[in-house]
């Protein structure tokens, strides 16, 4: 199972990727949408965990781009903002939606649910 | 006071000092102004009309009375004049046709008197007096033959003027009578004689008493000096002075308002009878004459008073009604305005909270992941395993982050619920959330919170954010009402009809009975001096209504207050927005 983590906070995604690695989940991370798209070309990821708000290309747009190229890919959104519109679109467009700070165990749970 | 309490309109106690934008009008002043203006506009014309009507009636009645008295006086004067003239003319006739010789003969004179009595009536005796004043022939009931009249005024007057009518006097016979006399010239000798007849006052009186004068009216004769000549009803006996002033001579009849000796005002008609000392007086008490006016005045007064009462009643009610409507409209306006203001304020607070939460969330997430990573390193890598102390510290960091996360999530959820968003709600969760906000304060003030929420209470459809606001307001109010060590109870139950009933009760200071019905009004506050806006309960009440519920309050001073909210289980749309607040 391969996971792609995308968030503009490098410290956050790198730590998350390492932690997922401890749990036998192969996780790569990217700090912006452009890098993420390049990485997705090179490898097939089962699940992409995207931050909703990123500079230039946001999580929602990135999701559209990714799913165009990789239709089988599943998505989980992360957000630091609990606004109603975020929640609605987030839960409608992705398999799951989590508000930061997240509990890693519940993220693992959601990932497992998504690939089932 | 208690009656006023009952009829006191709603606007009466509006507190004008709440602030410039609070209330558009000073209702009491508008009300007073309306009443005064309407009263003046309605009553002034009414009073003027009534006064004019009264004056016109009065003057027409007065002139009618004047006219009637003048007419009666004139008629009576003419009757008296005719009576006297007839008798004088009769004496003329005798003198011209009989000649003085025949008149001096007693037997002939008796025959003449008899025929005078028969054809004219009123003659008592008949006599002839020579130019020296001696009665040379006489026929009548008294023995007056040979009497000397030379020193009598009437004798002298008749000789100089040719004819004479006396006033009533007692004379030698000691009973009231009057005489008519006529100078006669004997054609043969050229000597002057006087033909003199005494007239019966009884017949004279009959003329006056035959007048039909109703209502205390009186008609009689006086002479020029005011001595009464014929009997009166109320102005004194015959030959005494009349108790009324005598008007100066006038050719025609005149009417005067005069005051009698006893102080009663009379309308008196005066008529001077030509060629006689008599004045006809027709008197009527002015009060009796004006009696119809009194009736009219009373009727007018009643109509006026009834009209004024009705007008005032209508004006009072209309003014109260109108001002009340303005008041209600103004209140509705103010309420809407402030609800909007409140919503805006809540929205900006929400945005601020969300912004803060978001900003904190990102670093928090990093702390979370880093600490998680450290923890993972200890757990998954053998080289770090076993250091319990480090692991404990890392767990403590993670716990703290989790706590911060809960706070930011709560802030975010608060911000999220500005707009109406219906969803299923478990009251227990909601109550816990609300109480969580105030748990610290409760601990500091040792306020015990007791929740009685049945486990099987069903979920209901409502707006979480608004419900949160409602209960937060109520719990906050309860906290303010209680002193330290108080007791707050929150309970819920399901009614038979399916509606849910929630109550928030405290054992605080309570609300006075007089304030109870106004506590849901906007701007009503007992805490104005300490910064209350008077909007908390009003907004809470509006929110409850918005959600299709109703809200009531029970309170006793010194014992505490309980707010009860009834919510439809199926949400606000199907429920009717009935206002059941006290």
Image: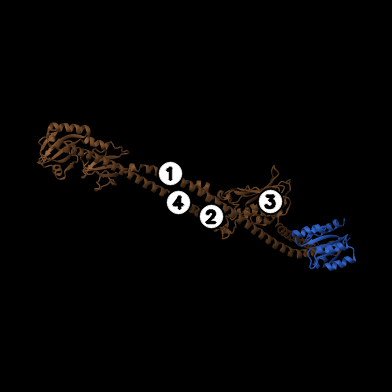
Chain colours: A blue, B brown
Number of other residues with Cα within 10 Å of mark 3, as a class: few under 14, some 14 to 19, many 20 or more: many
Q: Measure the C-alpha gap from mark 4 to mark 3.
A: 56 Å
Q: Is residue B258 above or below residue B107?
A: below
User: Which residue matches tag 2?
Assistant: B27
Residue B170 visible, this orientation: no
Instruction: Quadrant for residue B114, please give it.
Output: top left
Q: Is residue B468 left or right of residue B293?
A: right
Q: Which mark is residue B302?
A: 1
Q: Measure the C-alpha gap from mark 4 to mark 2.
A: 28 Å
Chain for mark 1?
A: B
Do circles 1 and 3 both sit on a common chain? Answer: yes
User: Which residue matches tag 3?
Assistant: B547
Q: Position of residue B310 (x, y in %)?
A: 48, 46
Are the residues tagged 1 and 4 within 8 Å (C-beta)?
A: no
Q: Which mark is residue B45?
A: 4
Whichever of labels 1 and 4 marks the residue nearer the N terminus, that label is 4
Q: Position of residue B493 (x, y in %)?
A: 69, 45
Mark 4 vs mark 3: in front: 4
Number of other residues with Cα within 10 Å of mark 1, as a class: few under 14, some 14 to 19, many 20 or more: few
Q: Measure the C-alpha gap from mark 2 to mark 1.
A: 34 Å
Do circles 2 and 3 both sit on a common chain? Answer: yes
Whichever of labels 4 and 2 marks the residue nearer the N terminus, that label is 2
Instruction: Quadrant for residue B70, please give it.
Output: top left
Do circles 1 and 4 both sit on a common chain? Answer: yes
Front-most of B387 and B82?
B82
Q: Which mark is residue A92?
A: none
Q: Position of residue B538 (x, y in %)?
A: 62, 53
Q: Measure the C-alpha gap from mark 2 to mark 3.
A: 32 Å
Number of other residues with Cα within 10 Å of mark 4, as a class: few under 14, some 14 to 19, many 20 or more: few
Mark 2 vs mark 1: in front: 1
């Amino acid at each position: 199972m391969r996971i792609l983590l995308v968030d503009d906070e490098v410290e956050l995604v790198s730590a998350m990727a390492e932690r997922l690695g401890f749990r036998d989940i192969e996780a790569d991370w990217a700090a912006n949408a452009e890098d993420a798209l390049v990485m997705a070309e090179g490898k097939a990821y089962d699940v992409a965990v995207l931050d909703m708000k990123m500079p230039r290309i946001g999580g929602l747009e990135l999701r559209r781009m990714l799913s165009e190229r990789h239709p089988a890919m599943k998505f989980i959104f992360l957000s630091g903002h609990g606004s109603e519109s975020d929640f609605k679109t987030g839960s409608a467009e992705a398999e799951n939606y989590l508000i930061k700070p997240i509990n890693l165990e519940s993220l693992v749970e959601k990932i497992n649910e998504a690939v089932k | 006071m208690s009656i006023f309490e009952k009829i006191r309109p709603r606007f009466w106690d509006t507190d004008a000092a709440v602030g410039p934008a609070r209330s558009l009008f000073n209702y009491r002043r508008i009300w007073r102004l309306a009443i005064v203006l309407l009263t003046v506009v309605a009553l002034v014309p009414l009073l003027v009309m009534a006064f004019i009507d009264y004056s016109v009636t009065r003057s027409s009645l007065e002139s009618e009375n004047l006219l009637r008295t003048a007419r009666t006086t004139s008629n009576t004067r003419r009757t008296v004049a005719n009576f006297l003239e007839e008798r004088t003319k009769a004496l003329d006739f005798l003198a011209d046709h009989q000649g003085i010789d025949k008149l001096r003969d007693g037997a002939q004179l008796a025959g003449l008197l008899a025929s005078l009595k028969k054809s004219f009536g009123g003659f008592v005796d008949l006599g002839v007096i020579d130019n020296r004043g001696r009665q040379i022939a006489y026929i009548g009931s008294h023995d007056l033959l040979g009497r000397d009249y030379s020193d009598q005024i009437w004798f002298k007057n008749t000789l100089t003027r040719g004819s004479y009518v006396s006033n009533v006097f007692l004379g030698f016979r000691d009973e009231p009578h009057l005489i008519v006399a006529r100078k006669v010239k004997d054609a043969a000798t050229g000597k002057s004689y006087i033909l003199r007849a005494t007239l019966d006052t009884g017949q004279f009186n009959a003329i006056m008493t035959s007048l039909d004068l109703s209502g205390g009216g009186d008609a009689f004769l006086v002479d020029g000096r005011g001595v009464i000549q014929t009997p009166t009803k109320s102005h004194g006996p015959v030959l005494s002075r009349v108790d009324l002033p005598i008007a100066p001579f006038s050719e025609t009849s005149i009417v005067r308002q005069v005051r009698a000796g006893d102080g009663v005002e009379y309308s008196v008609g005066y008529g001077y009878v030509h060629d006689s000392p008599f004045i006809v007086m027709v008197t009527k008490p002015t009060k009796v004459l004006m009696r119809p006016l009194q009736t009219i005045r009373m009727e007018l007064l009643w109509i006026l008073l009834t009209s004024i009462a009705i007008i005032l009643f209508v004006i009072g009610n209309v003014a109260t009604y109108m001002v009340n409507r303005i008041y209600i409209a103004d209140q509705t306006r103010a309420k809407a305005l402030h609800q909007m203001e409140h919503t805006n304020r809540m929205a900006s607070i929400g945005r601020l909270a969300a912004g803060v939460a978001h900003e904190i969330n990102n670093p928090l997430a990093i702390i979370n992941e880093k600490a998680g990573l450290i923890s993972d390193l200890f757990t998954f890598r053998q080289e770090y395993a076993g250091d319990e102390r480090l692991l404990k510290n890392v767990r403590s960091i993670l716990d703290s982050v989790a706590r911060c996360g809960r706070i930011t999530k709560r802030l975010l959820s608060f911000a999220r619920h500005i707009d109406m968003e219906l969803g299923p709600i478990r009251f227990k969760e909601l109550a816990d959330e609300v109480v969580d906000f105030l748990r610290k304060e409760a601990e500091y003030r040792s306020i015990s919170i007791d929740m009685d929420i049945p486990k099987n209470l069903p979920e209901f459809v409502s707006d979480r954010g608004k419900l949160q606001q409602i209960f937060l307001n109520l719990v906050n109010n309860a906290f303010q009402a209680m002193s330290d060590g108080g007791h707050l109870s929150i309970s819920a139950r399901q009614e038979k009809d399916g509606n849910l009933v929630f109550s928030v009760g405290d054992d605080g200071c309570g609300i006075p009975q007089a304030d109870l019905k106004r506590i849901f009004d906007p701007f009503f506050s007992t805490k104005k001096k300490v910064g209350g806006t008077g909007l908390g309960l009003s907004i809470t009440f509006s929110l409850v209504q918005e959600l299709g519920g109703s809200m009531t309050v029970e309170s006793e001073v010194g014992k505490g207050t309980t707010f009860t909210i009834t919510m439809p289980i199926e949400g606000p749309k199907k429920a009717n927005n009935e206002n059941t607040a006290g």
